[in-house]
Image (cartoon, rainbow, N blue to C red):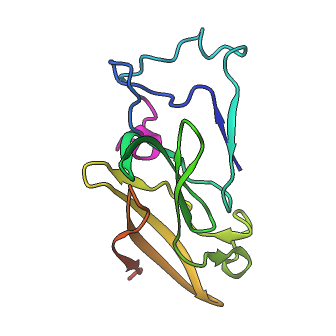
Amino acid sequence: TLSLHDALPISATPSGSPADVTTFHNDNLRTGWNPTESILTTANVASTKFGLRQVLTVDGLVLAQPLFVANYPVNGTNHNLLIVATENNSAYAFDASSGAVLWQRSLGTPQASADVGCPDIEPEYGITSTPVIDRAAGTIYVVYATEPSAKVYVTNLGAIDLATGNNKLAPVQISASA
């Protein structure tokens, strides 16, 4: 499960509308700083006004940072999207206001932690790194690990449609060379 708190979305543009969070820690420098923040104050994040908002159910551990896209069209209606990726190789788009699942996409069988020898992430190893969203292209880029058969490991780069959860392009296998 994933818990959302009252301050979502946690950033806004100077106009007061929600600001997109499309990569880990808000920007390409990974600073975690939003220089246009205008909503949060010590008064509105006080313990009497800040707390659990809702709990969202997902199918695995969430190690990647959830991402946010404001006012994006899904099935003809604009939604504030909360994008969540799991170690079970699933990507979800939730309506950030209602918590409704707008789409869910499975990207294949994740690697078994026991097979990989990774006791830090259990029971499976799938999407660990935070995806990146290109709002203009309507695309979520995600790296995910699969194990199509025992002890056979594959890492892919996928391009997922932000509005539907479908593949925009065929996944590309990433392989190391030395």
Reply above or below: 165 against 77.
below
Farthest top residue in view:
43
Farthest front residue in view:
76
Q: Which residues are magenta?
A: 21-33
Reply above or below: 17 against 3.
above
Q: Is residue 113 magenta?
A: no
Looking at the image, which is closer to me, 76 or 124?
76
What secondary structure characterizes most of the magenta part? loop
Residue in the picture at 25% in, 49% down: 136
On the image, the x and y values in percent for residue 37 come to 41, 21
Looking at the image, which is closer to me, 152 or 22?
22
Dividing the picture into quarters, in which one does residue 18 lie?
Answer: top left
On the image, the x and y values in percent for residue 15 come to 33, 18
Q: Quadrant of the C terminus?
A: bottom left
Q: Is residue 25 magenta?
A: yes
Residue in the picture at 53% in, 12% down: 41
Q: In this rendering, would 50 be left or right of 28?
A: right
On the image, the x and y values in percent for residue 112 come to 68, 77
Q: In this rendering, would 170 be left or right of 25?
A: left
Farthest left residue in view:
136
On the image, the x and y values in percent for residue 57 come to 69, 52
Q: In this rendering, would 28 be left or right of 124?
A: left
Looking at the image, which is closer to me, 167 or 176?
167
Residue in the picture at 57% in, 68% down: 89
Residue in the picture at 54% in, 74% down: 145
Q: In this rendering, would 29 be left or right of 114?
A: left
- Total numbered circles: 0
